[in-house]
Image (cartoon, helix red, strand yellow):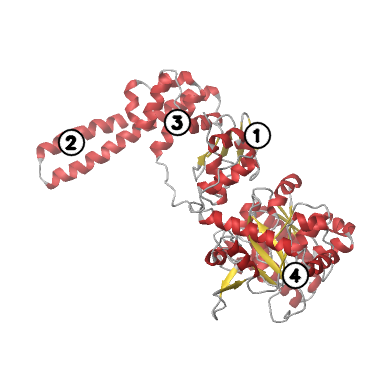
Amino acid sequence: MQSSPIDEIKNRLDVVEVISSYIKLQKVGINYRAICPFHSEKKPSFFISPSRQMWHCFGACSEGGDIFKFVMKIEGVEFGDALKILAQRAGVELKRQDPKLISERQRLYEICDLTARFFEKQLESKFGEEVKKYLAKRGISEASVKKWRIGYSPDVWQGLSDFLVSEGYKREEIERAGLAVKSEKGLSNFYDRFRGRIIFPIFDLNSQLIGFTGRIFGEKGKEEVAKYVNTPNTLLYDKSRVLYGLDKAKIAIRKENQCILTEGQTDVIMVSQAGFENVVATSGTALTDEQLRILKRYSNNLLLAFDMDIAGDAATKRGIDLAQSQEFDIKVITMPEGKDPADIVFQNPRQWKKLVAEAKSILVYYFDTTFSKFDSKTLEGKKEIARNLLPIIKRIPNKIEQSFWIQQLSHRSEVKEKDIEEEIKRVKLEANREVFSSEPEKINNLPVKSRKELLEERIISLILKSLRSIDLVEKNLLSLFSRQMQEILIFLKKGQKKDSELFNRLSLKAENEEIEKKDIIPEIKCCLLELRSLEIKNKLDRISMEIKKAEQEKNLKQIEKLSQEFNLLSKELK
């Protein structure tokens, strides 16, 4: 019997291998654990079981499942897209679908890939040769042009659109892919977004093409148009979640345990070409919470290689503040004035290597920059230094580190520590929750487990650690548990294992319970006692309500009966 593509993919791919390509894992016994990528936490509560080919978070979000569920969750895609991603990874060929049944998302992926091939082909044209000469002049090798799929968009109004229509796609679909713009002046309703530009394709973490950046090329109309044009937000492309080059850099970032962050595509290509493959770009936008959360899967260490003037771009500083609030270790690559990473690598690769090695801590950089600009011997200079540095110190989440930098400021500015501490209290931080908020991810939409459910899970996971302890759950205690849990306990009493997602999850929990063997039975007894107490409290609450009702109805016989029942249960609770 032929297996389904889903079974074939599961047979070929290992859950540990798939998940470790997204987040850092640590081996614990027969399993692996990690910081959960789906909610904010400091202590790892995310576990992966190679034997069961499953994962589960025992923390706040309680998410879990197989490799398909993980990819759907972390990529934010539907099952069909997760199937395609994992099939490609496993080398499993999916049967060609009826075009009418292909999802809109899949159609957009196809349009983007075909578009990239169209732009690449234009490099073979007469004008494309000029583009290649320009790229070579900038130091970008032919191998890099192919690796990053750089192309050129011809300077015509509908060249790409007409080509895609000839391939069977609608102009409305081309617009939804961010490649065409609806005209207000006719012109067959649509015209190409990218015209007369060098094209840099943008990929998601699975190297699927999702968007483009176009840099103006040629002299015609240069002053009148934007230097760069980007794909707008689409079903595939969300600039707040994408970092250029991360699909190619993620393995190197994990290996080096640091990420070089630049501003532009050319910087990434040139730095990567020079052997520093752990490099990505923000593509000219400020760092976002989503981008940082994705980067944290691979490393906590950031090397910033862009304009870091303390009095410069406020958006850049907000992004850095956000990274600090997420406890990234941030360093700054100090570059010569007016130079960007691509320039330095092209002119002197050795100098770039030296600058990376000499990267300064972000706080050291801020202090050195500020003290070089203002005279700490004058009152006005001291005030300016404090105005620049106090908000930065106040945002440091770690109080020990914050105290250290207060001491440094006190020493270098010759101002008493207690005076600096008083001034810090008066500093008001910018209230931009979207940028600065370091609160844990809200999980209000997720069902919160009751105390009873937590106790049931704890008891069964402990029994699974020591199967002989099943005898502690006597027949009269089974009724304390929910129907699902009762079924598992009955199977365990028979010496059997129940084949269910819940049982597998509890087994994984059992394998990672940190408890001494001698403490298992006392802990189960304690949990059973609390479970019984909860049941009695619930009954007492119910009887209290019934007594109030009987009092309203002046039913003395019912009041007496309920009161006796209440007293008996109260004694049992004590």
- Numbered mark located on residue 426 in the image: none
- Residue depicted at 50% across the width and 43% down the height: 63
The answer to whether residue 218 of the structure is visible from this angle is: yes
Tell me the crowding category of disc 1: few under 14, some 14 to 19, or many 20 or more residues within 10 angstroms, Cα based.
few
Give the structural element (helix, strand or loop) at label 3.
loop
Q: Position of residue 287 (x, y in %)?
A: 65, 62
Query: Which residue has dot 2 on it?
Result: 562
Q: Nearer the viewer, mark 3 or mark 1?
A: 3
Mark 3 vs mark 1, CA separation in Å = 25 Å
Q: Which residue is mark 1?
A: 27
Cα–Cα span, label 2 and label 4: 75 Å
Look at label 2 and name its amino acid: Leu
- Is there CB contact under 8 Å for labels 1 and 2? no
State which tag comes first along the sequence, 3 or 1. Answer: 1
Residue topped by disc 3: 500
Q: Position of residue 280 (x, y in %)?
A: 72, 57
Horizontal side of residue 139 vs 7, given as left or right: right
- Give the residue number, with chain letter if any, for mark 4: 309
Q: Which callout, 2 or 3, points at the residue further toward the start of the chain? A: 3
Question: Which mark is first along the chain, 4 or 2?
Answer: 4
Q: Residue 310 in the image: x percent, y percent?
A: 73, 69
Q: Could you give the CA–CA distance between mark 2 and mark 3, rounded to whole angstroms?
A: 42 Å
**Residue 390 visible, this orientation:** no
Which numbered mark, 3 or 4, is in the foreground of this view? 3
Q: CA distance from mark 1 to mark 2?
A: 56 Å
Label 4 close to label 1 by CB (< 8 Å): no
Q: Secondary structure at mark 4?
A: loop
* Image quadrant where residue 219 sits: bottom right
Q: Is residue 499 above or below residue 332?
A: above
